[in-house]
Image (cartoon, grey):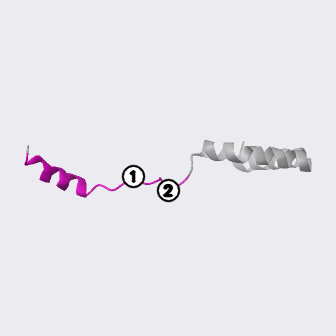
Amino acid sequence: MALTAPRTMIRTQGRTKRTRRTGRRHPLVATLMALPLAVLLLVVFDGWETVATQASSVGVMLGR
């Protein structure tokens, strides 16, 4: 049992602490974060027609 401690130290030397993952957010999380602000801006600036026009032009550009 006395010989297990050195082996454990060797195995754990290469490991690092887990840090917070840096990178991109999941698209669904990003959408859920941005959606309330987008709805608020639509209501405040009465932009329903503008959004419909933009969505239509994006759809045409994508070929749908």
Magenta-colored stretch includes residue 11:
yes
User: x, y (%) of residue 8?
Assistant: 18, 50
Q: Residue at x 19, y 54 (%)?
A: 9
C-alpha gap between disc 1 and disc 2: 11 Å
Around disc 1, counting alpha carbons within 10 Å, would you say few (fewer than 14), some (14 to 19), or many (20 or more)? few
Q: Residue at x 20, y 52 (%)?
A: 11
Give the side of residue 14 with respect to residue 1, left or right.
Answer: right
User: x, y (%) of residue 48?
Assistant: 88, 44
Look at label 1 and name its amino acid.
Arg
Which dot marks residue 22?
2
Please tell me whether mark 1 sits on a helix, a strand or a loop: loop
Give the side of residue 6 with respect to residue 34, left or right.
Answer: left
Around disc 2, counting alpha carbons within 10 Å, would you say few (fewer than 14), some (14 to 19), or many (20 or more)? few
User: x, y (%) of residue 34?
Assistant: 71, 48
Which dot marks residue 18?
1
User: x, y (%) of residue 12?
Assistant: 24, 53
Q: Which residues are magenta?
A: 2-24
Q: Residue at x 50, y 56 (%)?
A: 22
Q: Which of 64 and 9 lies nearest the eye of the viewer?
A: 9
Direction right: furthest residue: 46
